[in-house]
């Protein structure tokens, strides 16, 4: 009889532990979603924001656990291709460098870095001045 009671107790504990873990994971996701909306709301009133001579953040959107920023480059693809070719590289070969630059930019910003460390994602959509998309750079972790 005690063995049966112990087995039932173990089964209930196992089932409950899984449910608690699922609830905690869901609560964390909800927290990150809420924080994503807060991050976007903080950025929105200041847009558009010129980051550099060639880069302006125009739009911010919070979707699920991701904050997406649309960044407009001050030139078009033809200009990038010409400049890249003159430098002995291709526009495609610049994308990994843009990813590193984006990661450094996000992870050096206290608020964005904190959001990423919570489990959120910051995504930059880079567009040329004519609206054509160049690339998407995502940051899902910042090293401490």
Image (cartoon, rainbow, N blue to C red):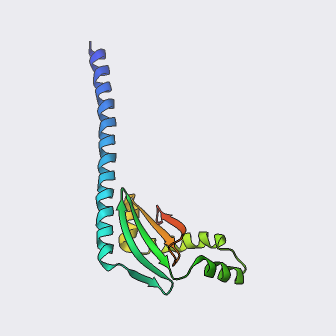
Q: Nearer the viewer, residue 28 or 144?
A: 28
Residue placed farthest to the right in the image? Answer: 88
User: Residue 139 in the image: x percent, y percent?
Assistant: 48, 64
The correct choice, above or below, for 8 with respect to 53 in the image is: above
The correct choice, above or below, for 9 with respect to 141 in the image is: above
Choose top left, top right, bottom left or bottom right for residue 51: bottom left
Left-right relation of 142 to 60: right
User: Residue 101 in the image: x percent, y percent?
Assistant: 53, 74
User: Residue 124 in the image: x percent, y percent?
Assistant: 47, 68
* Quadrant position of the N terminus in the picture: top left
User: Residue 76 in the image: x percent, y percent?
Assistant: 57, 79
Q: Nearer the viewer, residue 26 or 88?
A: 88
* Quadrant position of the C terminus in the picture: bottom left
Q: Nearer the viewer, residue 89 or 132?
A: 132
Residue at left offset 32%, top offset 73% = 44
Choose top left, top right, bottom left or bottom right for residue 64: bottom left
């Amino acid at each position: 009889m005690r063995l049966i009671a112990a087995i039932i107790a173990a089964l209930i504990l196992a089932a409950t532990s899984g449910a608690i873990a699922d609830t905690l994971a869901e609560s964390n996701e909800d927290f990150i979603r809420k924080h994503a909306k807060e991050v976007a709301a903080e950025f929105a009133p200041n847009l558009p924001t010129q980051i550099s001579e060639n880069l302006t953040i125009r739009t911010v959107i919070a979707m699920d656990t991701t904050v997406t920023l649309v960044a407009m480059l001050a030139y078009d693809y033809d200009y990038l291709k010409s400049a890249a070719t003159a430098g002995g590289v291709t526009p495609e070969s610049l994308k990994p460098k843009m990813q590193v630059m984006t990661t450094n930019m996000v992870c050096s910003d206290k608020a964005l870095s904190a959001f990423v460390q919570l489990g959120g994602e910051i995504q930059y959509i880079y567009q040329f001045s004519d609206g054509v998309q160049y690339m998407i750079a995502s940051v899902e972790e910042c090293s401490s």
